[in-house]
Amino acid sequence: MSGMPALSHLPPAALNKTVAMKTVDTRPFEQSLSLVPPTLSRSYPTESRVLDSIRFPNIFTSATATMKTRYTPADWSQSNLDHYSDAEATRGVSERVRDDAVRLVGFTYDRTNIAQRESSQRLGERVSDITFWRSELMQELDRMLAETNRLNDSRRMLEHALKDTENPLHVTKECLYFRENRQGIDLVRDHPEESLLREVDMIKDCQARMKNLLDRVNLQLTRNRAARQDLEHDTMNKNHALVIDSTQHSLYNHSPAITYYPGIERVDNTVSVPETWAEHTNRNIQQSQSERSGSQRARQDVDSLIAATHQDMWTSWSSSNTALTHRLGESNDTRNKLLGHRDKVQREMNDLERHIDLLKKAILDKSAPLKVAQTRLEGRTHRPEMELCRDPPQHRMVREVQELSESVESLRIKLSEAESSLHRLAQTRARLDHDIGVKTNSLYIDRDKCLSIRKSFPLSQPHLVDFTLY
């Protein structure tokens, strides 16, 4: 047993595992020896006669199994270095924390004083802003009601002018109604119709502008009251805010009214920013100024609108009459051209009918020669035996029948074409007759119905225009 290694010479990990293992039979020596790494075999030489008679814990098997999980000396050294480095880093962090704590105490003290001083300054500026805008609001309230009692005469003039617009509107709509009785292709969206429609739209637009202006006059006092209420409400809010901000501006660190309000900094019930706040008050003032000048503008607009709408309606009236007159000329020229084409078509039909008769006679004239040729051919079919010879007479008579048949077929085709052409000419004449009737009806509507009621402008107007009627 002198050749067996002592347990105290084994590595600690191997020793711990050896104590926990069961004693097993290591024979035969060849199997146990095959499990021992070469390095262990060289370090602990054994002889088979010694091992055969000894029973000991399975250190070889355990060592072999743990070889896969053991650390190397390099790992051991690196672990120690890591511990040294971690300790130094931790001490460094602690030193920096202490230094930062000292600096933070000083920083927060200065920051607190600066923040309170800036807040007090901002509150003072806010009090000044509120005082300024409150003064502006109160001045505007004093100037609000200067122009609200001067619109009665202008209102009566506007109502009378609005009533007068119904006459030209009625005439224009009646012309459009008459022109709906045009027929066929003449029921077209032509320039007179577009002009009449524009005239209707223009008169309605004039009426709408007059009504809007009349509504504006009637609502001006209400709008002034609404603007005044906005100014009064804004002034009241400014007074309330001025009291609150003045009170907050007077607070200091030893004021008896101060206390904790945890989480108040997260409460945001604001509805505006300085820009929108000032814009709101400025908008109220501007709206009041606009309403103050509304009465004067309304009186000026009444006179301007009456003159402008009268001129617009007269211009549109004249334009529609000009368009109707021009359309009369076009319709009359077109009807005359249609009459000319209708006469030409009729003459062509007469000529074509004569040619149709000529074609029919030519077809009839080919009947006898065709009978002769076919009879000759049929008679020669009765020749006896070898006399049935395809001789030159036979060839010529066959060609004669073919030529006659072709001639008759050509004449019949041409006759069919002529009859089709005659039918188309008849249809064309019918269309021309219908279109001539349509044009005559359109001339009657535009000349005798529309322009006859548009000779004079139905509003008081010094300029009158005479229109030449076709």
Image (cartoon, grey):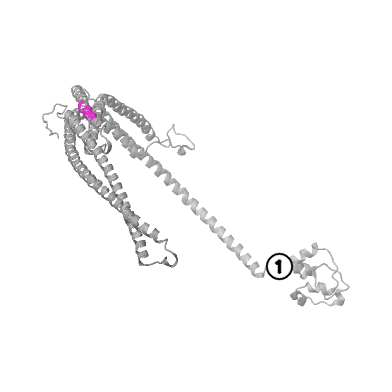
Residue 169 located within the stretch drawn in magenta: yes
- Label 1 Cα neighbours within 10 Å, binned few <14 / some 14-19 / many ≥20: few
Looking at the rendering, the stretch of residues picked out in magenta corresponds to: 167-174
Q: Which residue is mark 1?
A: 68
Image height check: is 47 above or below 425? below
Q: Residue 339's image quarter? A: top left
| Residue type for callout 1 | Lys
Q: Residue 192's image quarter? A: top left
By secondary structure, the bulk of the magenta-drawn segment is best described as helix
Residue at the location (34% across, 31% down)? 242
Residue 144 appears in the figure: no
Q: Is residue 422 left or right of residue 306?
A: right
Relative depth, front residue between 461 and 247: 461
Q: Is residue 46 left or right of residue 333?
A: right
Residue 67 appears in the figure: yes
Residue 143 located within the stretch drawn in magenta: no
Residue at the location (39% across, 59% down)? 379
Q: Is residue 311 left or right of residue 129?
A: left
Q: Quadrant of the C terminus?
A: top left
Relative depth, front residue between 352 and 304: 352
Relative depth, front residue between 376 and 308: 376
Q: Which x, y percent locates residue 200? A: 24, 32
Q: Which x, y percent locates residue 341? A: 21, 44
